[in-house]
Structures are given as structure tokens and as C-alpha cells.
Image (spheres, rainbow, N blue to C red):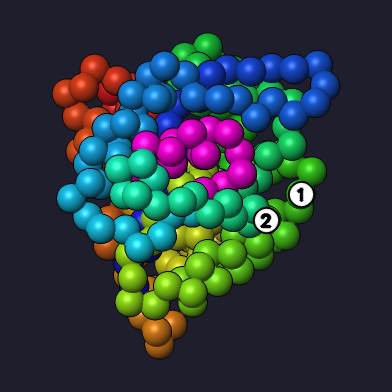
């Protein structure tokens, strides 16, 4: 089967004194999500999953509409900091020289969920999706940490949030064989955002 791991589009910045931030998409993020849906329209998806976090659900909605699919919520692909009271796009952290940007580059773990538990739930959830959709093409709209850790897992690399930087609405394709073999086909596929005047990620515009 072909698995498409898709990072959510650009959300708004949200910093709360208490509670869970869970931001919605920005105006640019909604445009990114629409371009994503148009790009994928030429490929028939058999199923569409998304993290329960708002930015992932809203990114998946145009894809669901274009494909005529329902969105299946997969709690196991929620981000590692899902319960955080703040969400600041990493581009803003980098531009401001915020210490949190350096911490992210260093791979520091700042979550109420132990890293090993996060990796286990991500891998278990994605492998379960693969098992349920043999010989099909399935998209999972999720988060940068989820994509980093799953790809690190199948490549045999140490668990890390900073293996690489997934761009907004980037597609990461994995060929998953029934024998258990997993092959990375593409990483950071973002041709749908080229020349659109929209932010793509930290290192590209």
C-alpha cells in the first residue's frame, strides 16, 4: 500500500495562560490546504485520516471534499505537545531568535508525554492504519513530530523531533509491503505550493 503522511497547514499563533492552545489555520494555511487538495485530486485516495487537533482536521477538510471521503480521526497521530498552552509557528521563533527555536534544533523534549510513549503510539497507530488498508492509497494528515518519528523508526535512526523539517502541507510517501518492508518514496513533497506566494517552511518560501 501507499501511505501519504501529510503535515498540517500553517496555523495561527496562540499563547494562553492556561488550557490547551489547539490553534486553527491561518488565512494562508487555508490556502495551502486548498492547493494540497487540488494537487491530490489526480490521485484516488481510498481513505483519509487526521489527527484530532484543529490544524490537522482543517487541513484535511478540502482533501475530504475533493476526494469524496469522510475524515477518520486518529488520536494516535496527535502531536507530542498536544496539551501545550501555546503554539508559535517555528518561522516566528526562528525570526525572533527565540530560545525555543534553538531547543527544537537541539531536539530537546518538552512534553507531558514521555518520548518513548509518543513514539510507541505513533508507530502503533500508523502500522494499524497500514494493516487495515492493504493494497490501497491512504493519507494521514498529522504533524511534524509524528512524521519525524515515524520516518526515523522505519529508517532505523534514533528517535528525534529534529531529523528534518517537514514543510507545511508537505507530503511524505511510504511504500508499505505486506511482508513488513517499509520504503520511503518521497520526503517534503511541496510542489503544490511553488510560486503561490505562500509560506512553505523555515527554509523555503
Farthest right residue in view: 18
Taking the spot 34% from the left edge, 49% from the top edge, the residue there is: 68
Taking the spot 31% from the left edge, 31% from the top edge, the residue there is: 34
Farthest front residue in view: 68
Element on which disc 2 rests: helix
Q: Where is residue 84 in the image (x, y as percent from the top left)?
A: 73, 32
Element on which disc 1 rests: loop
Left or right: residue 137 versus residue 8 is left
Residue, disc 1: 113
Taking the spot 21% from the left edge, 22% from the top edge, the residue there is: 196
Q: Position of residue 144 (x, y in %)?
A: 50, 43
Q: In this view, does 145 lie above or below 127?
A: above
Left or right: residue 1 versus residue 193 is right
Residue 36 is labelled as: none
Based on the picture, tell me whether residue 54 belongs to the magenta stretch.
yes
Residue, disc 2: 118
Name the main secondary structure of what is drawn in magenta. Answer: helix
Q: Decide: marks 1, 2 in contact (CB < 8 A)? A: yes
Q: What stretch is highlighted in magenta?
A: 50-63
Q: How crowded is mark 1: few (under 14 residues within 10 Å), some or many (20 or more)?
A: few
Q: In this view, does 173 lie above or below 154?
A: above
Q: Residues within 10 Å of mark 2 (few under 14, many from 20)?
A: many
Taking the spot 63% from the left edge, 56% from the top edge, the residue there is: 76
Picture quarter with the C terminus: top left
Asked whether 1 or 161 is in front, the reply is 1
Picture quarter with the N terminus: bottom left
* Residue 164 seen in the current view: no
Q: Position of residue 7 (x, y in %)?
A: 43, 42
Disc 1 or 2, which lies upstream in sequence?
1
Q: Position of residue 48 (x, y in %)?
A: 43, 54
Amino acid at each position: 500500500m501507499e501511505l501519504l503522511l501529510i503535515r498540517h497547514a500553517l496555523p495561527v499563533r496562540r499563547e494562553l495562560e492556561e488550557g490547551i492552545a489547539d490553534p486553527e489555520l491561518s488565512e494562508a494555511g487555508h490556502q495551502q490546504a486548498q492547493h494540497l487538495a487540488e494537487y491530490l485530486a489526480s490521485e484516488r485516495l481510498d481513505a483519509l485520516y487526521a489527527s484530532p487537533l484543529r490544524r490537522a482536521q482543517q487541513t484535511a477538510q478540502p482533501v475530504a471534499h475533493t476526494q469524496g471521503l469522510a475524515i477518520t480521526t486518529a488520536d494516535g497521530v496527535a502531536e507530542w505537545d498536544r496539551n501545550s498552552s501555546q503554539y508559535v509557528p517555528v518561522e516566528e521563533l526562528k525570526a525572533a531568535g527565540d530560545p525555543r527555536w534553538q531547543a527544537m534544533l537541539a531536539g530537546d523534549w518538552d512534553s507531558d508525554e514521555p518520548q518513548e510513549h509518543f513514539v510507541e503510539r505513533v508507530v502503533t497507530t500508523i502500522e494499524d492504519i497500514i494493516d487495515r488498508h492493504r493494497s490501497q492509497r491512504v493519507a494521514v494528515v498529522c504533524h511534524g513530530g509524528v512524521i519525524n518519528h515515524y520516518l526515523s523508526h522505519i529508517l532505523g535512526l534514533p528517535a528525534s523531533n529534529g531529523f528534518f523539517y517537514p514543510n507545511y502541507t508537505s507530503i511524505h510517501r511510504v511504500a508499505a509491503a505486506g511482508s513488513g518492508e517499509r520504503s520511503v518514496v518521497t520526503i517534503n513533497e511541496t510542489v503544490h505550493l511553488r510560486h503561490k506566494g505562500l509560506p512553505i517552511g523555515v527554509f523555503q518560501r
